[in-house]
Amino acid sequence: MPNANTNLHAAKKAKNDEFYTRLEDIENELRHYKAHFKGKTVFCNCDDPRVSNFFRYFALNFETFGLKKLVATCYKNQNADLFTQNASEQAVYIVYEGDKDGNRVPDPSEMQVLPLKGDGDFRSEECIELLKEADIVCTNPPFSLFREYVAQLMKYEKKFIIIGPGGAVSYKEIFPLIKNNKLWVGFKPFGGGMDMIAGRNYDASKCKHPKYDSHGNIIINVMMCIWFTNLDIPKRHEDLILFREYTPEAYPKYDNYDAINVDKVADIPKDYDGMIGVPLTFLDKYNPDQFEIMGRSGDIEWAEKECSFYTPPTPDLARKYRSNNKTWRIQNVYLLKNDIPQICYSRIFIHKIK
């Protein structure tokens, strides 16, 4: 039966990855970044500003945050309808520079609606020019373009708070940014997914128990949907409390990596200074002052070229392992039990700094 975890995959197959962020989720995350916004220009470059909850949130909190300017681009869509099909021939962008009449409400008369020459795509030259002028980018970009979207933010050295697929932490384009502390997980806990508004083209039958909001929009839980940022928050510097003691029996080593296996982040031993393989959910607790990220399993290029603690099996053993376990792959971490490789889930390799 379809479940919540199939929602994103189904949408990607259909090239329908338009999921809209609820205002309450934006509020719950962005309140932790208030200190970063004073005097800054915020750019929402994947949002129809007339209906975007990101634009609405920043407009309503413009004075509270002390913003300088708020800009949002519209992808060929001038209708105040969350699910229009981008049929308009005119793309626009909207500029809001705060309350002018003293009622502390963002009125339409206080917003400049300006035409774009192109279609409003975040990759277009005119949208890039708007990006260059921005201090902080905040939006929910199309997941199918997430790699390209982040690459653009990095190219222009922008600060950002964005939503992306949880699987992105393993992308070959994204993980090195995490490893080198150029991008990290936001405040919201890593697991549990996020309730989002699905586009009108979304097939409700793909949900086992579809939910609807007060406007009749389908609400789905997109699993492993998380916030990414490069803005510092206190959570990032909280030490993970370690209380387990290391024993070889409790923490076996992988056959192909000189690192111990840890199945739960809470079980990282306090007294082990070597390499440790931890689940991806470790990123939710990652403090760069406490741990250093070395690499990840599944990246054979890194393992063969850079990893000093990787030892591949001989060709004969590789054939034997593959014969004993059809799911075995040389790039994945595994433990041996009676000469049969036991495959572990994807792991991040870390070691303690303090």
Image (cartoon, rainbow, N blue to C red):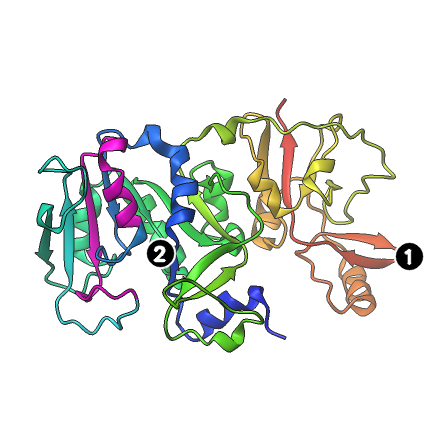
Q: Residue 38, labelled with which disc?
A: none
Q: Residue at x 46, y 74 (%)?
A: 13
Q: Nearer the viewer, residue 21 or 234?
A: 21
Quadrant assignment for the N terminus: bottom right
Q: Nearer the viewer, residue 280 or 222?
A: 222
Q: Position of residue 92 (x, y in %)?
A: 14, 59
Q: Which residue is mark 2?
A: 141
Assess whether mark 1 and mark 2 are in contact (beta carbons under 8 angstroms): no
- In the image, residue 69 lies in the stretch drawn in magenta: yes
- In the image, residue 205 lies in the stretch drawn in magenta: no
Residue 141, above or below 29: below
Q: Which residues are magenta?
A: 54-82
Q: What secondary structure is marked by label 2?
A: loop
Within-10-Å neighbours for mark 1: few <14, some 14–19, many 20+: few
Mark 1 residue type? Asn
Residue 215, above or below 128: below
Q: Position of residue 35 (x, y in %)?
A: 34, 28
- Between the C-alphas of marks 2 and 1, the distance is 47 Å
Q: Residue at x 55, y 30 (%)?
A: 287
